[in-house]
Amino acid sequence: MSLCIKGGEGLVEKIRTFPPSPVNEKLKTYRKGELAGIVRVSDRCVGCDTCRTQCPTGAMMGEIGTRHKIDYDRCINCGQCLINCPFGAIEQMSFLDEVMKKLEDKNSFVVAIVAPAVRVALAEEFGKPPGTLTVSRLHLALKKAGFHIFENNFAADQTIMEEGTELIGRIAYWELGLKEIEFEIKDIRPISWVKKVKLDLKEFENKPLPQFTSCCPAWVRYAEVYYPEILPHLSSCKSPQQMAGPTAKTYGALKVWKVNPERIYTVGIMPCTAKIYEASRPEFDSAWRWLKEKGLVTTKFKDVDAVLTTRDLAELFRRKGINPIEFSENEKPENFEWYSGGGTIFGTSGGVMEAALRFAWSVLSGQEPPALSEKWNFVKVRGYTHPRVEAKITIPLKSELKKEIGLDEVTLNVCVVNGIGYRGLHIKDVLEEVLAGTSKYHFIEVMTCPGGCLNGGGQPVEPMGTSWIDPVLPLPL
Amino acid sequence: MKEVVLRHPLSSRIVHFVNMICWYGLFLSGILVYFKMVDNYERAFLMKLHILFAAILTLVIVSYIVVTPDRVFLFMQEVLNWDKDTIAWWKNFGGYPYKFLGKTKIYKYIEKFWFAKPGCPPQTKYNAGQKLLGLTVIFSLAILGFTGWFLYFFREALGKNGVLLFFNLHVWIAIIVTLFVTFVHIPLVLVNWPDFVSMFRLGSGTVPVEWAKEHNPKWFEREVAELKED
């Protein structure tokens, strides 16, 4: 099967896919049940060697002129090799056929978990310019195809509340020397609510600063395989996809859709090939474990049953004769279709960082972060042109905290790693400093793909681009 | 002693020789790799060889331009000089179809066509066909060198469409020009044996005056005779 790139625009070949299948190799860095070989090199490889210079781990092996090969034990499944291959010689594992069958099955309740980066890329597959936004029309197209919607942005908002709370806990324990902290999380749109949170900071004894983000599954695997000592620094929060899956199968099934959780089949629709791997991780069956404890289910299931890439979704729409561009962009969201701007910016490099810090600012200062302020200068951590950016964010403390710790404000040093880079070029010294205890940062966001999920391995292949031009430069950018 | 005239100076003969060896080395290694006619390990070795040949060829051509710019200028002046006789040569391909087929049975079927007429308008140092070949080789060397080295050193700066364009230009220009050289240039130069000998013999690159007068009368009259007078 092959998936079209940008409706045949340009010279770049189509991306071919293959059904999920085990790798015929004995692997050392995967646990039982984890999917390996999400991307593989086909015999169409001409050995141009572009992929090797975009691989963050050195998993892509081969010399110029020869068919390249992926060392799956070293591979973190990011798919950068695939989207940078000019010859379309790298293929992707796809659950498309399985999802198509589930959509036809009347007993299945298929839930699409749609990632933020998908809505700015899908239109490319239908002849629209890159960046064309499809939100409401994407939802309508998915519904027409038979899906129910659980916005991954909604789950990203959940993530940021968890991850932001964790960041506040680490800062309060390690930076402010507090034993416990109490605060309110509130929102006014669309439904006003307030939640009081009291953190016993003892649990942060083993969660040191700086805190790393944990949304990117390729980065998590990179840390596990190459820098296991760094793991206590990673946020203990699941990624939005893995929060969405169990929420859909528990709260969604029981309280919102009122269907038997065993009927729910969750499909992550992601800009990412590593998400296919992430969904297969054995620990991600928490919905089943919770429901089993309550005596509500018997059959074992995963939190996320299948993952489709943006390219896969476009192919699904094509097979079903659906063009998402033809739908209205003015549909009112319902249930899990609501989300905040903080959830949306997860899709771009610097987005998770900004969302978490907005949350931390709100909690620690007791005010909404100002739209424009010198102390709140986020421009530095946005953008795609630099592999690593840093900023200083000063948060004025609310009166209760001022009294308790005798400080007017707290300044956080933050860093965004915008793509791990060839053989870890952009991240290695950040990690070495953290391990040596000399890092000045409090919070570090890592996106394996340059630009973040927008440029993920599951996105439509942009024929004009290459992720990084570092390899042609004598010095790093 | 037989009177001779210098046709190919030493610097040009060295460049021609290196070009010939490297071109075929590049072609064979490239073809074996592109069409995957050998296994992966051999392809890795052949690509190293390909790059080595390319480096030698690039070095020799750049040196030729730097060390003997006068020869490069004269050569370019000659291959770009297309007068009415150069154009007229194409009317019957310099009489070559007649030379090859005039005494065969096939000729009676083609004799009425323009390309089968006998005769050849007077040519300068190189005839029109050689001029076309010279231009083809110069431009193809430039394109192959540029695309090849760009793909080797700067492919990430090209983008995927750029890589594909450069890659396909590199492969297909090399194949087409090699076929042209192998099946047109080489057989014709073997027919013109004194020219072949002057290019490849160990001694000087001269041709007999009589041969020059017959094949390249304009060159002989305008340049060789003038030099003789001087």
Image (spheres, coloured by chain):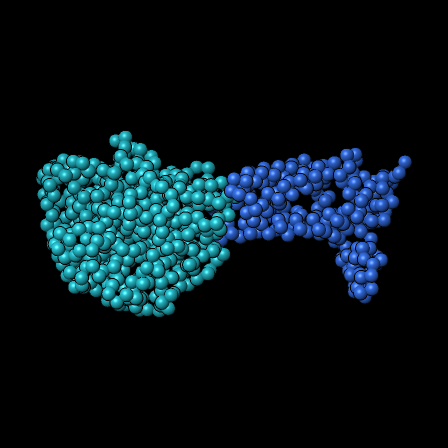
Task: Identify which residue is drawn at 72% across, 39% down.
Answer: B12
Left or right of A39? Residue A406 is left
Q: Position of residue B142 (x, y in %)?
A: 62, 46
Which quadrant holds the C terminus of chain B? top right
Confirm whether residue A459 shows in the render: no
Q: Residue A413, image x and y in percent?
A: 25, 39
Residue A311: x, y in percent? 37, 58
Question: In terms of image quadrants, where is residue A471?
Answer: top left
Tell me which chain appears cyan: A
Q: Is residue A253 above or below residue B70?
A: below
Q: Nearer the viewer, residue B164 or B230?
A: B164
Residue at image coords 42%, 59% = A1
Q: Colour of chain B?
A: blue
The reply, left or right, for residue B199 in relation to residue A22 is right
Q: Is residue B163 above or below residue B64?
A: below
Tell me which corner region of the image, top left, top right, bottom left or bottom right, holds residue B223. Answer: top right
Residue at position x 24%, y 41% in the image: A234
Which residue is drawn at the image coordinates 12% and 37% (left, top)? A202
State how many labels appear: 0
Quadrant position of residue B59: top right
Judge left or right: residue A452 versus residue B88: left
Residue in the foreground of this view, choosing between A127 and A18:
A18
The image shows residue A40 at horizontal and vertical percentages of 41, 48
Q: Specify whether residue A17 is in view.
A: yes
Q: Quadrant of the N terminus of chain B?
A: top right
